[in-house]
Image (cartoon, helix red, strand yellow):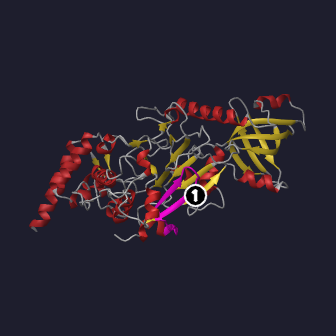
């Protein structure tokens, strides 16, 4: 009876404290607070009050209560053997961040209607600048259709606003530019064009070659996408390599810590046969493509899957590991949806407050996602991959086990700003940072937890694997990841070599 009375008293104390701080507790939030110590409950409520939270749900409480002590990482003893003479150390780094294409930490947006209008106009202007250079294509504004006679050839550039199949089986598009709109049809008996049309997305900017029909109707004869120019892969004369990894997920119970430590020892020349060490010694650039930590409150009940239940301490784990990267290797890190940045694209660089020790290192560089950098004259685009999920549900013949195919679809469209209003949010910055404004020589990504590679129109595509075991979500989806893999790219020949650390012995 005494314990029941005591429990009731604690509950009343929690509710009273919440009322004092103008916090409205959901029933689930109250249940979580009752299970915690009264001291932890008070601390959580105080923090929420300081953050001006009004309605408190279970996720809010869970995020506050999981600030427990870190499970200490096994300290690494990494030292470069005196016998290891890395060739890359003899070369000066040759890189520059392409800041004109990168969102900075200081960029802000209000999210107003005007901001979104400006974003889409910027996107349209850029896509028009590409499409207008197509040989044999002379686009005019949509309002020129009024002056065209029936069956006359018309060329124009527009945004796809709507798409449907007509009663007669033709593929119909509602297209618009800044001033006008029209309806355009792909006739059902044109099988090749129907297939292409079915893969066109809403909000995509396309060029149309067609003939004028009745009224403002256009019969489509050819669809042009911005795409990359046709070219051969550009190589460099220096005998250097780049290494690509992704999705470390430090702090997760499924984080492959031992395998990642093996990777770092390998990077320092402690492991590997003589042939491998020669290859490793040429690594001058390391690219880490997002989801560096597992994060907090990313999905419901995430806390049960966390070994480290504090976001700052997750980054401490990451720092202890990445500080073992050799100083002569220039390292570029972008965020993912599990990192401590906004969910919406474009994502800003990981703030200094989360990884202060890494920010102090002259060879470690934090970029946004998407992020651009040029290495040895090769324009390199990094993007974690969240927007690409939109393609898997929309386009056929795409699979998370072949992420390179989805990336090619992105490159064809020259933008990460797909179907606005879908699951992936977008922030309307002062400039459209989501358009692919250069034809990249290299594209490095992550997110899918599956390695994939290809070459498309001179661009070498590498999607990194992960350092996390198969998750419950992946099991439900039937997706088998490729963990523990590092990809090594020869910059002088574009040859890709894989190293699997799951097969390594400690």
Q: Nearer the viewer, residue 144 or 68?
A: 68
From the image, which quarter does the N terminus lie in? Answer: bottom left
Task: Name the residue carrying label 1.
Answer: 453
Task: Answer left or right for 22 relative to 98.
Answer: left
Segment tinted magenta in the rendering: 476-499
Tell me if mark 1 has few (under 14), some (14-19) or many (20+) residues whose alpha carbon lies within 10 angstroms of its own.
some
| SS state under label 1 | strand
- Residue positioned 31% across, 58% down in the render: 28
Residue 343 pos. (x, y %): 44, 46
Is 204 magenta? The answer is: no
Coordinates of residue 288 in the picture (x, y in percent): 44, 51
- Residue drawn at x 39%, y 49% as measured from the top left: 339
Q: Residue at position x 55%, y 48% from top? A: 443
- Residue 198: x and y in percent read 72, 53
How many numbered tags mark residues here? 1
Considering the image in quadrants, where does the C terminus appear?
bottom left
Q: Is residue 491 magenta?
A: yes
| Residue 450 visible in rendering | no
Residue nearer the viewer, 371 or 470: 371
Query: Horizontal and vertical percent for residue 399?
Result: 59, 62
Residue 281 showing in the rendered view: yes
Image: 211 above or below 41? above
């Amino acid at each position: 009876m005494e314990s029941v009375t005591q429990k009731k008293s604690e509950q009343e104390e929690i509710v009273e404290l919440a009322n004092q701080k103008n916090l409205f507790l959901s029933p689930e939030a109250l249940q979580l607070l009752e299970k915690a110590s009264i001291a932890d409950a008070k601390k959580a409520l105080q923090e929420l009050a300081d953050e001006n939270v009004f309605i408190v749900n279970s996720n809010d409480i869970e995020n506050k209560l999981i600030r427990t002590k870190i499970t200490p990482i096994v300290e690494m003893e990494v030292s470069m053997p005196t016998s290891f003479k890395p060739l890359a150390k003899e070369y000066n780094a040759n890189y520059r961040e392409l800041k004109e294409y990168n969102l900075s930490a200081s960029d802000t947006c209000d999210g107003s209607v005007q901001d979104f209008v400006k974003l889409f106009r910027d996107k349209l202007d850029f896509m028009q600048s590409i499409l207008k250079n197509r040989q044999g294509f002379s686009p005019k504004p949509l309002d020129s259709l009024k002056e065209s006679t029936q069956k006359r050839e018309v060329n124009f550039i527009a945004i796809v606003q709507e798409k449907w199949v007509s009663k007669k089986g033709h593929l119909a598009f509602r297209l618009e530019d800044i001033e006008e709109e029209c309806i355009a049809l792909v006739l059902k008996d044109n099988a090749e064009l129907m297939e292409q049309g079915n893969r066109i997305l809403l909000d995509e900017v396309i060029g149309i070659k067609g003939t004028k029909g009745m009224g403002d109707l256009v019969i489509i004869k050819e669809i042009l996408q911005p795409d990359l120019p046709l070219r051969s892969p550009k190589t460099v004369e220096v005998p250097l390599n780049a290494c690509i990894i992704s999705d470390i997920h430090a702090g997760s119970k499924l984080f492959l810590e031992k395998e990642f430590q093996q990777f770092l020892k390998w990077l320092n020349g402690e492991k590997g046969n003589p042939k491998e060490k020669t290859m490793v010694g040429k690594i001058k650039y390391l690219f880490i493509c997002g989801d560096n930590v597992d994060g907090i409150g990313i999905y419901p009940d995430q806390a049960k899957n966390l070994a480290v239940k504090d976001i700052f301490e997750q980054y401490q784990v990451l720092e202890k590991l990445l500080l073992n990267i050799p100083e002569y290797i220039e390292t570029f890190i972008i965020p993912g949806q599990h990192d401590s940045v906004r969910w919406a694209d474009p994502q800003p660089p990981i703030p200094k407050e989360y990884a202060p020790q890494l920010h102090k290192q002259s060879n470690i560089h934090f970029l946004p996602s998407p992020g651009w950098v040029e290495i040895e004259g090769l324009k390199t685009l990094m993007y974690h991959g969240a927007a690409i999920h939109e393609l898997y549900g929309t386009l056929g013949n795409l699979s998370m086990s072949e992420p390179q195919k989805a990336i090619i679809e992105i490159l064809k469209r020259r933008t990460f700003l797909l179907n606005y209003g879908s699951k992936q949010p977008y922030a309307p910055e002062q400039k459209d940072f989501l358009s692919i404004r250069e034809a990249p020589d290299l594209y490095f990504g992550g997110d899918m937890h599956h390695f994939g590679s290809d070459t498309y129109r001179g661009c070498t595509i590498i999607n990194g694997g992960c350092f996390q075991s198969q998750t419950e979500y992946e099991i439900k989806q039937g997706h088998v990841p490729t963990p523990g893999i590092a990809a090594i790219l020869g910059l002088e020949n574009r040859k890709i070599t894989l190293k699997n650390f799951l097969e390594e012995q400690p």
